[in-house]
Amino acid sequence: MSTTYDIVAIGNAIVDIIGRCDDAYLAKHSCPKGSMSLVDDAKMSALYAGMGPGIEISGGSAANTAVGVASFGGTAAFIGKIADDDFGRIFAHDIKTSGVAFQATAQKGTSPTSRSLILVTPDGERTMNTLLGISTELGAAELDPVIIAAAKVLYLEGYLFDRPSAKAAFRQAAEIARKAGGKVALTLSDGFCVDRHRDEFLALIKTDIDIVFANEHEITALYQTADFDDAVRRIASDARLAVLTRSAKGSVVVEGGNSTNIAVDPVSHVIDTTGAGDLYAAGFLYGYTQGFSHAKSGRLAAIAAAEIISHTGARPATRLNALASQKGVL
């Protein structure tokens, strides 16, 4: 069977509600700055009531990555779960019009579509407060073996790893992809997510994962070290390929004993860091699936991350292939 998709992403189908606040507002509501916290409906309502004007836009980490790949001109599909409600319709509309294949059937009479209230402080840092909803109920029934087998890379979102049914679905999807000759990638998603699943993530990385994506906080949390270089040495032994981001310090691609350092793409003013890691992954995966070098793939990743932090929201406002072409990379 010929490959149909550069990537197939599996993750939470979430609608983001993005608003601005100051650090004092975060402290008042006990929101750890820069983190992702799971909240109930009462806290979601309290946060929403007190923040400034917000905008609604589809998000979800792996879904953002799929959209980014499509924006580069790649082919992508997304597997996630939505409810038959207003937020579910928003999500389905947005991802399809972004050029990503999405065939989920909206579920009636169930938990609501997942959503995340993202509070952005004046320095551009984002603090996510997520109401899980139906997306975390994803299981084997939502997997499409034909789509998964048609991917060059299956991309798994660590955020989705909290429920046994999702863990089982991850492993089943990875097996389908590997049997079809595809690669499997995992994003660690969040430091707190790593703390919850450290041992299982390490086991997955050593046995079933071809590419690991993590930021500096996540990779040091994985190995319970404060030393980034120590974490790099350890992931080099455990993973076939690791792509590690360090915000303003750039990123590093680690494969065996070789490391490739990638500089950031300059941004005059950071507006909102929501989705920076997601779009970095999109750029790298697009390059990887086209057979580009790690250096060129990393350059595309840096361009995508820079574009996303220059405006509000986690979906590109500019066609990424056109932007990369302007910069002489594509």
Image (cartoon, grey):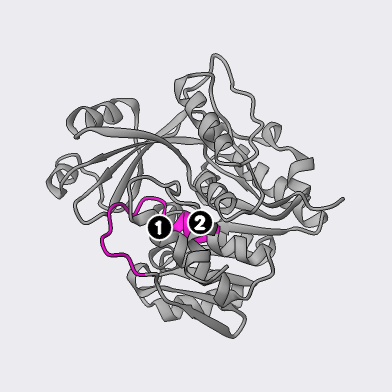
Would residue 182 appear left or right of 324 to someone viewing this image? right
Relative height, residue 14 to residue 293 (above, below): above
Q: Where are the magenta residues, as a range? A: 266-282
Across and down, in percent, residue 57 comes to 41, 36
Q: Which mark is residue 307?
A: 1
Q: Amino acid at mark 2?
A: Leu
Q: 302 or 59, which lies in front?
A: 302
Relative height, residue 228 to residue 32 (above, below): below
Q: 56 or 49, which lies in front?
A: 56
In the figure, residue 6 lies in which quadrant? bottom right
In this view, which residue lies farthest toward the front? 326
In this view, which residue lies farthest toward the left? 24
Asked if residue 281 lies in the magenta stretch, the reply is: yes
In the rendered structure, are the residues bearing label 2 and label 1 in contact, judged by CB atoms less than 8 Å apart?
A: yes
In this view, which residue lies farthest toward the top? 109
Q: Which residue is mark 2?
A: 320
Asked if residue 102 lies in the magenta stretch, the reply is: no
User: The residue tagged with tag 2: helix, strand or loop?
Assistant: helix
Across and down, in percent, residue 214 comes to 48, 63
Looking at the image, is mark 2 or mark 1 earlier in the sequence? 1
Q: 295 or 180, which lies in front?
A: 295
Is residue 140 in view from this perspective?
A: yes
The crowding category of the residue bearing disc 2, from other C-alpha atoms within 10 Å (few below 14, some 14 to 19, many at least 20), is many
What residue is at 21 percent from the left and 27 percent from the top?
Answer: 49
User: The residue tagged with tag 1: helix, strand or loop?
Assistant: helix
